[in-house]
Image (cartoon, grey):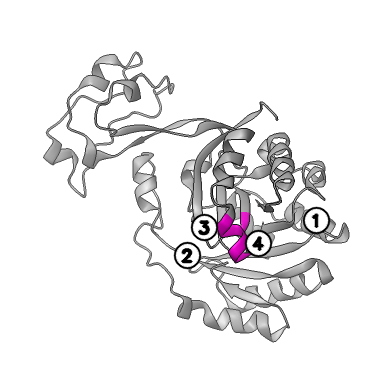
């Protein structure tokens, strides 16, 4: 078995929105996109980070004492730091070198590491625990992130291991990568879940940091190679939720032919706002209300009118 490891933020059991059936989803750290609405900010950077959870912090000052970089702010009264509108963030992220000395001395898990190495063996053992759920629901394991193609060699090893165990696999990718990375995964996974953020390249770049041309080229190449694909559309208010954009998605989707299994509409939610706070990051969507299924039912109808199998929620 491979001794390689990948930085993983979470291995989530009983996942029902990351491919067919009940699944175990492995979230890898590192992503080339900077989506303004990102629901997994802890997966953006390809290195371990520190969560600071103010409600657990007693302001004991131990982390302040051990920090060699002066990156920890002096303690203040807990009631002050824990106020909803408090600007106290504990860590000066510009000075922090992520030596993790502060985490080591924190007695109350107010400071924790997000992103730790997982071996192929460790993931496989975790997956095997849920094997009966996979059999009964048609589920399996999804490698997500972040972006899988930042850790392609590790992903290949875990996909091989899971296939040997008879477990269905999905690769969840943004497809913004060199084609060679996706090509390596052809025939090694049962299903590709591929995000479509916006059909307009300029609007796509404005909200993700990159154009969509390479992404669409890679999706077409996957289809031409006979890969099984489900397109995933994160529906974000006032960004990509117009009927015109969904019509363009439908045209693109139908061009993929028999490789396309269907489309999943993923309603925007703000449940991740606390993760931005724990990472000391501002998030422009904090006050935006989460979307309900009924809010995007009309978009589902558009896709279905083109004969496309569509779900809300994945």
Give the quadrant of residue 287. bottom left
Give the residue at mark 3. Answer: 15
- Eyeballing the image, is 300 above or below 82? below
- Say whether disc 1 or disc 2 marks the residue closer to the N-terminus: 1
In the image, residue 299 lies at what x, y percent? 58, 79
Which numbered tag is attached to residue 196?
A: 4
Horizontally, residue 200 falls left or right of residue 13, namely right
- Say whether disc 3 or disc 4 marks the residue closer to the N-terminus: 3
Give the residue at mark 1. Answer: 217
Cα distance, mark 3 to mark 4? Answer: 21 Å
- Say whether disc 1 or disc 4 marks the residue closer to the N-terminus: 4
| Residue 38 shows in this picture | no
**CB of mark 1 within 8 Å of CB of mark 4?**
no
Q: Magenta includes 217?
A: no
**CB of mark 3 within 8 Å of CB of mark 1?**
no
Cα distance, mark 1 to mark 2? Answer: 26 Å
In what quadrant of the picture does the N terminus appear?
A: top right
Q: Label 1's element?
A: helix
């Amino acid at each position: 078995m491979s001794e390689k490891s990948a930085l993983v933020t979470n291995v989530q059991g009983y996942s029902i929105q990351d491919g067919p059936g009940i699944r175990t989803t492995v979230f890898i750290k590192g992503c080339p996109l900077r989506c303004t609405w990102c629901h997994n900010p802890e997966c953006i950077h390809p290195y371990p980070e520190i969560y600071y959870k103010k409600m657990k912090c007693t302001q004991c000052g131990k982390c302040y004492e051990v920090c060699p970089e002066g990156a920890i702010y002096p303690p203040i009264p807990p009631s002050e730091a824990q106020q909803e509108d408090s600007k106290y963030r504990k860590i000066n992220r510009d000075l922090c070198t992520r030596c993790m000395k502060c985490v080591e001395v924190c007695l109350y898990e107010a400071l924790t590491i997000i992103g730790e190495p997982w071996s192929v063996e460790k993931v496989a053992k975790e997956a095997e625990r849920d094997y009966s759920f996979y059999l009964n629901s048609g589920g399996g394991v999804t490698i997500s992130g972040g972006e899988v193609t930042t850790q392609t060699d590790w992903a290949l090893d875990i996909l091989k291991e899971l296939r040997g165990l008879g477990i269905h696999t999905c690769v969840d990718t943004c497809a913004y990568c060199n084609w060679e990375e996706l090509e390596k995964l052809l025939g090694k996974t049962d299903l590709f879940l591929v995000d479509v953020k916006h059909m307009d390249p300029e609007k796509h770049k404005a909200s993700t940091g990159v154009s969509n041309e390479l992404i669409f080229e890679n999706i077409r190449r996957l289809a031409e190679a006979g890969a099984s694909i489900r397109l995933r559309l994160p529906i974000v208010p006032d960004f990509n939720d117009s009927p015109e954009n969904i019509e363009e998605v439908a045209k693109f989707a139908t061009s993929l032919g028999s490789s396309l299994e269907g489309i999943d509409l993923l309603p925007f939610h703000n449940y991740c706002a606390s993760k931005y706070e724990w990472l000391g990051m501002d998030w422009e969507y904090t006050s935006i209300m989460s979307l309900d299924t009924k809010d995007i039912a009309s978009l589902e109808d558009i896709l279905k009118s083109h004969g496309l199998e569509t779900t809300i929620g994945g």
